[in-house]
């Protein structure tokens, strides 16, 4: 300190002379030095760009090599989006640009207006800060020189400037613009995703036919929001410091000389590069954390969805283990990130606050120590003013630079969210193109199955339902039936039977367009002409009316000219008019209010409301007694609806004309169904089966009886032999006393 204060004294002539000589020689060669410095900078920059391009080319080549070695298994996304590598590379910028186009759709959009007004406030704020820095210098200078009037005037002006400065500060600062922007981004992105997610049955395919996305709900509800916040925050945290850096440094370079500033910038750049190398991949950490959060949340929602079953099984301990495991995996990861952040924060603090702070002070001292020739020596007041202004500028500039540096962490976090959200969009687009990716089970790996899986069938619209050589393939790649051919014409009711898991419901999934058609030809009427009632009735949210007309809206109902009293009539038909207690607008959690049987009848009521051409009834009356089932089926037929029924109940045979019978081994029979004849045959068959079932018991009884007979025969033989022996003895004059007798009386044998 002592040495420094000594150096700064103007009386230290020798040093001043030395410095002024150095500076005059520096000024003499200033333009040459500048040229050399800028040339060096340019060469360094060009080298960095060339290296970056080479790196990208090498990465692309590596990626191509990876893709070609796993041909046929890659997707548009390439890697499982939940786990793909998160880096600040070309892919990140491509993805970010794609999302930016969604969240800021045009120059006239609301988001653009918000961004522009935000930016304007940011510029005004920086210019005002610049002005305040100068004012501060003048005030301190007036203080040092003892100029009271100047000082008071300065203070008054300071207060005047404070009014617009405060307003711009609060407008430019985070809260208002940033939150508004984040909300706008989220709305745009959510709408965009909802449009795609709920079109072409994508929500079904994402969960059932493709396993690249694990928790789509988490991605849409949480990650989109985090991405939007992160993007809005980044603009505030990056745009302002970059602008500050530019303006402050420009002003500083005017005050202290461009080369000094450049030298300092070079040092800062080197240390920043070192820091960047040492910065952990926070983007990947964030993406992993979001994935683990999703998995943990999903375990909880599964517990809630199946609470009754789990409670009845007494499965709470097993569920607790699953939940604990999910939670601790997440927490372990969060703790790991925290530790990495701690070390990284310490390094950042040291470099940015202390090392760069010291560099800044050295820079501020330039005009103090170096007297510029031709320029009159500065007075103490001038030097103070210059120092205070420069120091303020420098503090703001280094603060801005620090924030740019810190924002690297935020950028990597944004990269994490960008990767997850764009991963979801990639997979959705892929599904829309008809490309699915799912880990196939072993049976799918046979060549014959692979050939079926690689094919695609034809789907056409018609009045009948017809399948010609269509394979039924499960999403796991299991070929349930190689080539199925059958047809349903209006009025020709079809019954489908077969063992569990043979592919009965899968047929409807293909018919409904949920599963791809891997071959053959499918003809089917437009979707609105087929109504499907599944095994488990779906009860939606909303009013009682909405339950009956689902998926129609009340507007559709009005368009169909159906009234509430018509609905009541339908409920009477299915025998549940009692559920209307508080009017049609009553809203409750109907799934919990109604029993399974009532839910099935509500599903049938929907069918009577929609009155389609074809009704697919997939075991949907299993909880009904025979009399109710009869009423329901009679009503369906009386409405002219053609039935396609899956049921094991013989009582339903009489309602059908054709039968499609699967054997569960990949074979099937499609034929006319003469219910009466078939029932008779079935009765006879059952009788014979009953008799056959008794055969083993009869055989066992025969064996038992044979054993008894054999035993009796053996006993009789033994007795005969004994008698023969006794007779022989008598003839020879011997007699044997009978046991228990002593009188020598002969006992009869
Ligand atoms: N989303 C899915 N992902 C993977 N495999 C599936 C999926 N849905 C069904 N499967 C499989 O397809 C096969 C046929 O199922 P399907 O539901 O068609 O049987 P089903 O004949 O209707 O049986 P059930 O009489 O028990 O209802 C089963 O092995 C089943 O595991």
Image: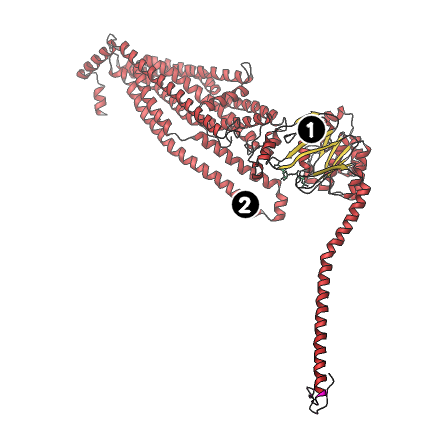
In the rendered view, tell whether residue 185 sits above or below residue 142.
below
Taking the magenta stretch, the answer to whether it contains residue 172 is no
Residue at the top extreme of this rendering? 374
Decide which of 444, 392 is in the foreground and name it.
444
Q: Could you tell me which secondary element the residue under label 2 belongs to?
A: helix
Mark 2: give few (<14), some (14-19) or many (20+) Cα within 10 Å. some
Q: Which residue is mark 1?
A: 522
Mark 1 → mark 2, Cα distance in angstroms = 47 Å
Quadrant of the rendering where the C terminus is positioned: bottom right
In the rendered view, tell whether residue 184 sits above or below residue 539.
above
Decide which of 680, 605 is in the foreground and name it.
680
Decide which of 279, 232 is in the foreground and name it.
279
Stretch of the chain drawn in magenta: 731-749
> Is residue 215 left or right of 686 when viewed as pictured?
left
Q: Which residue is mark 2?
A: 320
Find ligand 1 in the image and state its quadrant.
top right
Do the residues under discs 1 and 2 have CB atoms within 8 angstroms? no
Q: Is residue 334 visible?
A: yes
Residue 109 percent location from the top left of the image: 56, 16
Q: Could you tell me which secondary element the residue under label 1 belongs to?
A: strand
Taking the magenta stretch, the answer to whether it contains residue 743 is yes
Residue 662 percent location from the top left of the image: 70, 40
> Is residue 16 left or right of 93 when viewed as pictured?
left
Which of labels 1 and 2 is toward the front?
1
């Amino acid at each position: 300190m002592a040495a420094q204060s000594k150096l700064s004294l103007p009386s230290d002539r020798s040093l001043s002379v030395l410095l002024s000589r150095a500076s005059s020689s520096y000024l003499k060669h200033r333009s040459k030095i500048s040229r050399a410095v800028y040339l060096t900078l340019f060469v360094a920059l060009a080298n960095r760009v060339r290296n970056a391009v080479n790196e990208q080319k090498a990465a692309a080549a590596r990626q191509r090599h990876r893709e070609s070695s796993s041909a046929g298994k890659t997707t548009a996304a390439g890697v499982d989006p939940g786990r793909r590598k998160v880096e600040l590379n070309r892919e990140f910028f491509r993805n970010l640009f794609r999302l930016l186009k969604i969240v800021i759709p045009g120059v006239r959009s609301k988001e653009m207006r918000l961004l522009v007004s935000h930016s304007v406030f940011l510029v005004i704020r920086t210019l005002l800060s610049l002005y305040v820095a100068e004012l501060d210098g003048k005030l301190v200078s007036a203080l040092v020189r003892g100029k009271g009037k100047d000082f008071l005037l300065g203070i008054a002006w300071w207060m005047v400037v404070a009014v617009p400065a405060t307003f711009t500060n609060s407008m430019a600062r985070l809260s208002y613009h940033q939150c508004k922007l984040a909300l706008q981004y989220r709305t745009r992105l959510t709408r965009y995703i909802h449009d795609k997610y709920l079109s072409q049955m994508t929500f079904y395919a994402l969960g059932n036919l493709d396993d690249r996305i694990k928790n789509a709900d988490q991605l849409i509800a949480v990650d989109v929001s985090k991405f939007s916040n992160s993007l809005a925050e980044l603009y505030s945290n990056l745009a302002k410091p970059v602008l500050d850096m530019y303006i402050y440094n420009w002003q500083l370079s005017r005050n202290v000389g461009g080369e000094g500033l450049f030298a300092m910038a070079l040092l800062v750049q080197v240390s920043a590069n070192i820091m960047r190398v040492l910065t952990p991949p926070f983007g990947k950490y964030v993406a992993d954390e979001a994935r683990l959060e999703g998995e943990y949340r999903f375990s909880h929602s599964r517990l809630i969805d199946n609470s009754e079953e789990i409670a009845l099984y007494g499965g709470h301990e097993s569920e607790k283990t699953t939940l604990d495991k999910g939670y601790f995996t997440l927490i372990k990861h969060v703790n790991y990130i925290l530790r990495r952040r701690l070390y990284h924060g310490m390094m950042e603090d040291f470099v940015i606050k202390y090392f760069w702070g010291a560099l800044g002070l050295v820079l501020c001292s330039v005009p103090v120590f170096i007297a510029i020739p031709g320029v009159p020596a500065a007075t103490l007041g001038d030097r103070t003013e210059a120092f205070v202004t420069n120091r303020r500028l420098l503090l703001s500039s280094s603060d801005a630079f620090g924030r740019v540096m810190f924002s690297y962490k935020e950028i990597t976090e944004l990269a994490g969210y960008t990767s997850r959200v764009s991963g979801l969009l990639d997979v959705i687009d892929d599904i829309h193109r008809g490309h699915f990716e799912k880990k196939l089970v072993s049976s799918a790996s046979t060549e014959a199955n692979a050939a079926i899986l690689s094919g695609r069938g034809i789907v056409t619209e018609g009045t009948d339902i017809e399948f010609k050589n269509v394979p039924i393939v499960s999403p796991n790649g299991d070929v349930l039936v190689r080539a199925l051919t059958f047809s349903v014409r209006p009025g020709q009711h079809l019954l489908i039977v077969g063992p569990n898991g043979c592919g009965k419901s899968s047929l409807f999934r293909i018919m409904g367009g949920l599963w791809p058609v891997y071959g053959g030809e499918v003809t089917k009427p437009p979707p609105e002409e087929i109504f499907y009632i599944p095994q488990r009735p779906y009860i939606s949210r909303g009013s009682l009316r909405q339950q009956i007309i689902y998926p129609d809206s009340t507007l559709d109902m009005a368009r169909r000219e159906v009234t509430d009293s018509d609905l009541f009539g339908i409920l009477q038909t299915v025998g549940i008019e009692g559920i209307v207690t508080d009017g049609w607008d009553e809203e409750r959690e109907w799934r919990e209010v109604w029993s399974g049987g009532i839910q099935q009848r509500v599903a049938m009521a929907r069918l009577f409301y929609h009155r389609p051409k074809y009704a697919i009834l997939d075991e949907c009356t299993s909880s009904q007694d025979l009399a109710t089932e009869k009423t329901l089926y009679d009503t369906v037929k009386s409405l002219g609806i053609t039935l396609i029924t899956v049921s094991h109940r013989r009582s339903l045979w009489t309602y059908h004309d054709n039968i499609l019978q699967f054997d569960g081994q990949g074979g099937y029979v499609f034929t006319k169904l003469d219910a009466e004849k078939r029932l008779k045959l079935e009765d006879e068959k059952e009788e014979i089966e009953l008799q056959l079932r008794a055969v083993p018991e009869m055989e066992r009884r025969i064996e038992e009886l044979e054993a008894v007979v054999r035993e009796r025969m053996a006993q009789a033989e033994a007795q005969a032999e004994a008698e023969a022996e006794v007779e022989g003895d008598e003839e020879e004059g011997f007699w044997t006393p009978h046991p228990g007798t002593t009188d020598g009386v002969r006992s009869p044998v």
